[in-house]
Amino acid sequence: MNPHRSSLTNVPQNEITYDMCIKALKLSIWAIFEIPNQFRTKDLWHLVLEKNFIKKHSSITRYLFENLPHNIITSEICEYFTSDNTTLFEYVPKYLITEKMIHTVLDKNTNLLQYVPENMITKKLCEKYLAKNGHILRFVPLQLRTIDICEIAVKENGASLNYVPDEHKTEQICEFAVLQHGTALQYVPESKLTMKMCEIGARKHGLNLYWIPEKFRTLEICNIGLETYPSAIGYVPINIVTLEMCKSCVSKNGIALMYVPEIYKTKEVCDIAVKQNSLAIKYAPDSSKKRANNAEEIVNSKKQKTI
């Protein structure tokens, strides 16, 4: 229901005249929705759609556009509306979309590719706009997602690897993706994953250790990740965690104590963490419990667990 009122609001329908409709429109464009159908002529709609008139009433643009009669709306009208407000492209009837309109709206918002009719999406169009926003690969028809198109997408946005067909996820494309965005590791098939990709991802951000399969989380890869993100200690396989590694992590970020394996939460490690950030105290173990205080006790404890 239209929340706006016009000068026609309280006028009985049988007393409304064409001249009254014209005057009401000049006072409030919302009056178009209170004008009886017999007065909603093409001339009246053309008055509403005059550029100088509609610009004075921009708040109604989307509401008006969605309710234009099919015998009134044209490609030219759609081009005019969408050139000023690209979000309206979603409501343009498919049969009225033109190539000019497509380029106009995509130049301003590439995500609107999702509303372009599939038969109007071309390789050339994809190449142009994927170079600006690789993530819109998800809107590209599958038959157009060739290796070349996918390569353009992942070079711009590595996370778009998620939308690359499995048969096109070559080692080269996967590496391009990880180089652009470390989190793309999560979309790399394990059969294509290499130590080089894991190292690249870990250097991008230590949190990417999460996406690396455990068999690839070597001491070297983990140390690279921990340099940029100490809290990633929680993703380091327990068999390669060391006391020195834990001390190093909490010395850079005391809150990383939260992710330190319980067996390594020694008094020394906790003291270092709290010194770096007093809030880390809440992640320290209960002081009433006996805790190992040196590497030898930790090693012995680990050996007993494996027996």
Image (cartoon, rainbow, N blue to C red):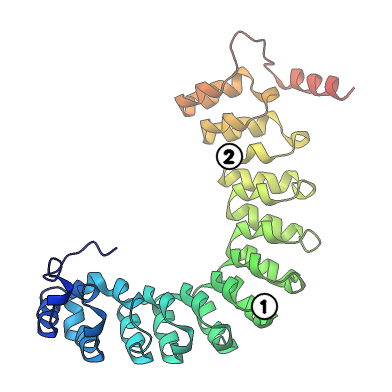
Quadrant assignment, res 184: bottom right
Give me the residue at 59% from left, 35% from top.
249
The relative height of residue 139 versus residue 39 in the rendered view (above or below) is: above
Q: Residues within 10 Å of mark 2 (few under 14, many from 20)?
A: many
Query: Mark 1: which secondary structure?
Result: helix
Quadrant assignment, res 238: top right
Q: Which amino acid does label 1 sit on?
A: Leu
Which residue is identified by label 1? 142
Which of marks 2 and 1 precedes in the sequence?
1
- Quadrant position of the C terminus in the picture: top right
Quadrant assignment, res 172: bottom right
Give me the residue at 69% from left, 67% from top.
174
Let me know if residue 156 appears in the view.
Answer: no
97 or 267, nearer to the observer: 97
Q: Which amino acid does label 2 sit on?
A: Pro
Residue 106, numbered circle: none
- Quadrant position of the N terminus in the picture: bottom left
Give me the residue at 16% from left, 76% from top.
14
Q: For marks 1 and 2, give the one nearer the viewer.
A: 1
Which residue is identified by label 2? 230
The relative height of residue 178 versus residue 234 in the rendered view (above or below) is: below
Q: How crowded is mark 1: few (under 14 residues within 10 Å), some or many (20 or more)?
A: few
Horizontal placement of 24 versus 173: left or right? left
Q: At which x and y percent is residue 141?
A: 63, 79
